[in-house]
Image (spheres, rainbow, N blue to C red):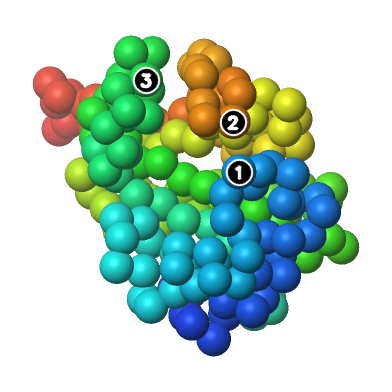
Amino acid sequence: MDITFRPLTDDDLPLLHRWLNDPGVVRWWEGDDVSWEGVVRDYGGGGDGPEEHYLALLDGEPVGWIQCGSAAHWPDESAAWRALGLDPAVAGIDYLVGEPAARGRSLGSRMIRAFVDDVVFGRHPGWTQAAADPDVDNVASWRALAKAGFRHVGDIPSGKGTGRLMAIDRPPAPGAGRAGTVTS
């Protein structure tokens, strides 16, 4: 099963709207406007905001949504993350497994890891870390992050309660750490 990503388009907004209003998803978006107008405003028009929005595809079929952006675009969140030791060049991610039948099958962790490798670190050489802060009660979300290689950094206040800050570091470049090695 192959996980790939493609940029979200306006044609995808009805699907994203349906996913964001699914009972298994909407409870974690509490306080966000997931009405049709809100989805069009926040995700439509090619995304002129600081985030990059993608659909996650499993063998070519949409199963989830994922986004990334430099945490520097959100000063309050970035300051809280830095206070717990994250780098100023950290990228934030948000995600959801949209199709209910795809949940609970480790797809979330595979999707997150592939996205971090392919998009966050693969397309953004300046980002040194990736992080997310799901609600502490969203156990499935932070467990998916842990299975994807993220570590728990600490808990932070969020607009919706308490977030469990999870982060992963960019892997060292091939050959890094070999300074001073002599070969003959």
Q: Which residue is mark 3?
A: 80
Report the label total. 3
Disc with the residue nearer the chain's start (2 vs 3): 3
Using the numbered discs, state the Cα–Cα distance from disc 1 to disc 2 in whole angstroms. Answer: 7 Å
Check disc 1 and give the amino acid type.
Gly
Disc with the residue nearer the chain's start (1 vs 3): 1
* Above or below for 141 versus 158: below
Look at the image and tell me whether residue 34 can be seen.
yes
Nearer to us of marks 1 and 3 is 1
Using the numbered discs, state the Cα–Cα distance from disc 2 to disc 3 in whole angstroms. Answer: 15 Å
- Give the farthest residue toward the bottom: 11
Q: Where is residue 54 drawn, in percent x and y?
A: 49, 66
* Number of other residues with Cα within 10 Å of mark 3, as a class: few under 14, some 14 to 19, many 20 or more: some
Q: Quadrant of the N terminus?
A: bottom right
Q: Which residue is mark 2?
A: 160
- 10 or 34, nearer to the observer: 34
- Residue shown at the point (67%, 24%) measured from the top left: 136
Q: Which residue is mark 1?
A: 31
Q: Where is residue 99 drawn, in percent x and y?
A: 78, 65
Q: Quadrant of the C terminus?
A: top left
